[in-house]
Amino acid sequence: MATSFEARLREDRPIVADGGLGVVLSAAIAGLRTPEEANLRAPDAVTAVHLSFINAGAELIETNTFGANRRKLAQNFLDDEFERINSTAVKLARDAREISGRDVFIGASIGPGGDDYAEQARIVEGRGADVLMLETFFDLEELERAIEAVRSASSLPVVALMSFDSDAVTMAGVTARDAAARLRALDVAAFGANHGRGPAAALTALDEMAGDGAVLAALPNVGLATMTGSRIAFPHATPEYFGDFAARARALGARLIGGCCGTTPAQITAIRQAVEEDRVAPVRSASQGSREVAAPPSAEEPTELERLFATGEFVVSVQLDPPLGGSIAGLVEAARVIKESGKAHVVDVNDNPRARARMSGMIASAAIQRDAGIEVIPHLTPRDATIAGLESLLLGSHAEGLRNVLAVTGDAPEAGDYPGTGSVYDVDAIGLVELIARLNDGTDFHGRAIDAPTSFFPGVAVNPTADDLELEVDRFHRKLAAGARFAMTQIVFDLDFLERFFDRLGGRPSIPLLVGVWPIRSLELAVRVHNETPGIVVPEHVQERYRAAGANGASVGTELAHELIERARTLADGVYIVAPFRRPLGVLDVL
């Protein structure tokens, strides 16, 4: 079917691919060392998942072989099963095709990080695959080597896919534009984006890759994963959102459209319907000297934040992202202007938001507090450091004058067996609060005395819009027991969610609470956040306000922020306002 696959790519109607096979199998089958082990341990389950995607409308299903190279299998003591895992995977996909009775292409999934691309390609072609799907690469040179290797062993057409962030850049620094230029020269059947930050990031990459008759492919994650307790959770992207994504991807030249981690048959059905209806892509809206030095507080003094809470003043913070580069000057200047405006009491600084490496939020906060003269609430996640690393960072930050710390679980690294991902999580956010409390008592995490106790004012995050509200309430109670002194909510767009959370909690919290407010400036961003950002809900009635406003979406964002701030005065002790990306002083227009 190789020739027919390439012929179908040349047709106007795109091929609909399947969704997140490996994630579904890992969630459904207990004790898997790697998703590919399911081919041997639970073959019926693999076939059933394939069938679910075929029944949803997929015309191409991928084999369960993404991480089935010898190197990755060896990490789970499965390298002796290399040939059987790959061979069985194709057989199971073909079984599903035969059971369905439909004309479905079999795409053999091959991921990065192996050194046996040719051998893997030879096996899957021999078992009857129709196309080789080289996917989730972030190093372009490795992808080029993989293409050369599989072509030395197989005559099957090749689809080459890379994983991009929301700026259309891979973790190795490869831009989508450069990738397209080099992959186009290799004459692959199609190239494009998969995995990554979600549909919006894939569309950004495709926009950079389009042109010169490029045959593109788009198979993104459902969005960025997050941690809920010990579970990986994905955003609740609506099928309609994926239908719109499919229309936009098609308009950019995508001839193969599907999903990756977190995508279910519901999203694939929406893609298929959008393709069959020839849905038109929605129009994208237009977007949108001397310094005062703050003296660090003594160990005995309360922080300014603590003092404000104690006096009952309604606290306003501005949330800033640390820089992506090595200069803090711009952020310090923005914080200085915010302080001089008199419109905010403090600023809070994220810690590697979206699990993308930035300047340390703690180090950036120390510079802001020292050079801009405004108190800071740095966020700190245990995702990226061991207990020893967290203790070192906290002790050094304390010496630099930081006292407020918001303990957050942090955005999860990319889920699944993908290159460059990983996390530490020796403790979760609850354990981090316990660690801070022990440092305040004069001991380290293991109870050993330290030279001098700290005087941190620890806070915690809470999500009133969590999917599992009972779990969220339970974790909040545990955070209080661990020593939390204040809390900051996830961003909310309707404070009815907060009141429902209070009902579950049994009343207002016993500690001060800041409500998160984000003045989103466009319908497009509101819809993207709702569908792609885990833990955040933009209710339909809020989205409808943006739709009704048309090009005046920014004014809706400002009006909604004002409404939320005013209502928060009766429900909470303050708010934090998310500053516009790359334009932090825009927050002053709202305040």
Image: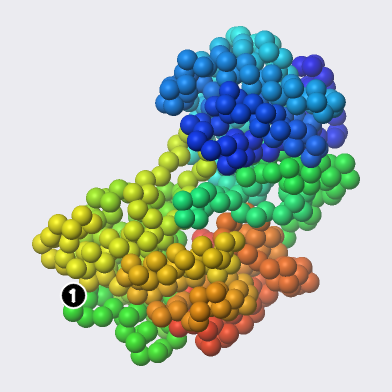
Q: Which of 450 and 480 lies nearest the eye of the viewer?
A: 480
Residue 380 seen by the camera: no
Q: Is residue 376 above or below residue 182?
A: below
Q: Which of 127 and 518 lies nearest the eye of the viewer?
A: 127
Give residue 268's position: percent from left, percent from top. 75, 42
Q: Residue at x 73, y 68 (%)?
A: 540
Q: Which of 408 and 142 lies nearest the eye of the viewer?
A: 408
User: What residue does disc 1 label?
Assistant: 299
Q: Residue at x 64, y 35 (%)?
A: 21
User: Image check: 380 left or right of 271?
Assistant: left
Q: Is residue 76 above or below residue 375?
A: above
Give residue 327's position: percent from left, percent from top. 36, 55
Q: Which image quarter holds the N terminus?
A: top right
Q: Residue at x 63, y 75 (%)?
A: 494
Residue at the farthest left position: 451
User: Image check: 91 left or right of 409?
Assistant: right
Instruction: Report the colour scheme.
Output: rainbow
Q: Quadrant of residue 117?
A: top right
Tally of marks: 1
Q: Element type at marker 1? A: loop
Q: Residues within 10 Å of mark 1 (few under 14, many from 20)?
A: some
The three-letter code of the residue at mark 1 reads Ala
Give residue 186's position: percent from left, percent from top. 64, 20
Q: Quadrant of residue 395?
A: bottom left
Give residue 212's position: percent from left, percent from top. 73, 31
Q: Residue at x 68, y 68 (%)?
A: 539
Residue 263 seen by the camera: yes
Q: Which of 452 and 178 lies nearest the eye of the viewer?
A: 452
